[in-house]
Amino acid sequence: MADVLSSPPDLDRANYAAIWDAVARAVPDRVAVRAQGVTLTYADLEEHAARLAATFVAHGLGVDSRVAIFMYNRVEYLITLYAAYKLGAIPVNINFRYHGAELAELLEMSRPSALVHPSSLGAAVRDAAQRVELPGLVLVVPDQPHDEPHDEAPGQTRPDGASDEDAPGRGDASTDAMLFARALDAEPLPAQDRGPEHKIFMFTGGTTGRPKAVVWTHGNLFDSQLFSIYGSLPVAQPTSLADVTRIAARDDLPRTVCLPLPPMMHATALFNVMNAMVLGGTVVFLPAARFDPAAAARAIQEHGVTRLIVAGNAIVGPLVDVLDSPEAAGIDISSLGTVLSSGMVWSDDLKRRLLEHAPHATLIDIIGSSEGGPFAYGVVRGPDDLPCRLRLAPGAVVLTPDLTPVTEVGGTGMLAYSGAMPLGYHDDPARTAETYPVIDGVRHVMPGDWVRVLGDGYVELLGRGSGVVNTGGEKVFPGEVEKVLLALPGVVDAVVLGLPDPRWGEVVTAVVVPAPGTQIAPEQVQDEVGRRLAGYKKPRRLYVLDELTRSPSGKLDMHRLRRRLTEVEQPALVDAAGAPDGGQGR
């Protein structure tokens, strides 16, 4: 697979470690990150990353080694990411909501040489260690008590409070486990010459049910982010590393203070944090793992946050509910200049309510994916821009299944994009060829999002063509949940699908058929799925039917079933309180 590097030709050092090193030299005393009561300047952050990189080298890591990050948003996540980039190593994002079996599968797929995780996720790591050999180096970040995760909602993990004796790898002589702080005792690794060809893995769910790694290069990713980084600033796009550094060091430009509310294991939060550091901005993390909308509102005011990263209604809903409450009287979030969401339902009503509290903010609703993009933007600069309309991004087109452009107003097709994009999927040439077709000699990315053409460059999003359920920013593969349901005593048939939800986009919905005379307890269904799979995969709506009408080949008419469920049937269980939290929610 050939590298596709399209950064400006003079920007030959489009590598995030090289850029951040240069920024740290230019503004060493500027605050880079505030989190968990810790404040690190750019000089501090660079030194921590250099020390961790030296520890990685001491344990045999180097270019293309993989570093698995099984962690929610916190300072150590950023240090680990930076250290991996310094080596030319490949960071591997792992969903911190995974149970042991799911973690083991991803470790087996990615084959990392190091794993970094908080002590509160120790139980999942120990479970995974019974299924797959852990990496040779495991670093443990001790948690504070309020960081320990819970499993009260989809998208949240189980209780895994850990103690010092819970360190992973116990009994496995091949695994060298140590506390993260000890890894920072090494002498700092001198800066290395790193270029745009080094890789970044972004694991994402998919229609196969198995996570797959989208492979970006530093150069491709940086080029794809140029508009996001510099589009709102009164500067020309840089053409050299010196230009990048000069812009970051300028004191006359608005200072970026970025608060990501979704977890950095997702591309939207990760890439925007990286962008903020390119600008020499400050990254703020909430003080606890669980998404707390009241804490988010206070953090925006306390730190003067200018760029807020959200996940559509799943985060904006709770945030504006808090801001509208009497308890939030006096909280001022007017510092917000940009609020950005990608790939999630974000209703006009919530956009309007947010603008009442942040009247100077520009709301940017992006249709994008880990595979590439952006495909379309919805930009709201004030109430007069509502209802929000999606407009195709430069380089985006709408294509029919036979890869010809859709030109007629009212026509439907799939979004495609021909700008900077990843190399493809790791070790999956067939899927890469399918998702990244070459059309008239030009490479495109087509993840499968269907839209209706409205004219003048505007489109209406219809949804992903596959059966994957996108709930609160998490992707759920129906077959994985169906397998658990069909293993329940008395269940003779089952199907899982996503039904529309105004807040979460979709909620995981299960339809089960019991054997004659058998009673299905809704709580049993949720408990069993929650015991086997991550919490966000538990059904939030359950329908018990006498039968599922299938064709002779065993297929269901999903359109007819959806219509029946939404128009006729009443679910046996509607667990609104347990809906996905859409943020880092533990």
Image: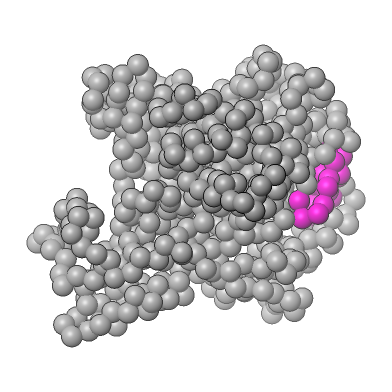
* Numbered range of the magenta stretch: 35-58
Q: Which x, y percent locates residue 98?
A: 53, 64
For image coordinates 21% across by 73% down, the residue present is 513
Q: Which x, y percent locates residue 176?
A: 74, 68
Q: Quadrant of residue 440?
A: top left
The answer to whether residue 79 is magenta is no
For image coordinates 29% across by 25% down, the residue present is 453
For image coordinates 23% across by 26% down, the residue present is 411
Report the front residue among 104 and 495.
Answer: 495
Is residue 394 in view?
yes
Report the front residue among 96 and 518.
Answer: 518
Its colouring scheme is one colour
Looking at the image, residue 327 sits to the left or right of residue 282; the answer is left
The answer to whether residue 41 is magenta is yes
Report the front residue among 50 and 149.
Answer: 149
Is residue 84 in view?
no
Q: Which x, y percent locates residue 39?
A: 83, 47
Please identify the dominant SS of the magenta region: helix
Q: Quadrant of the C terminus?
A: bottom right
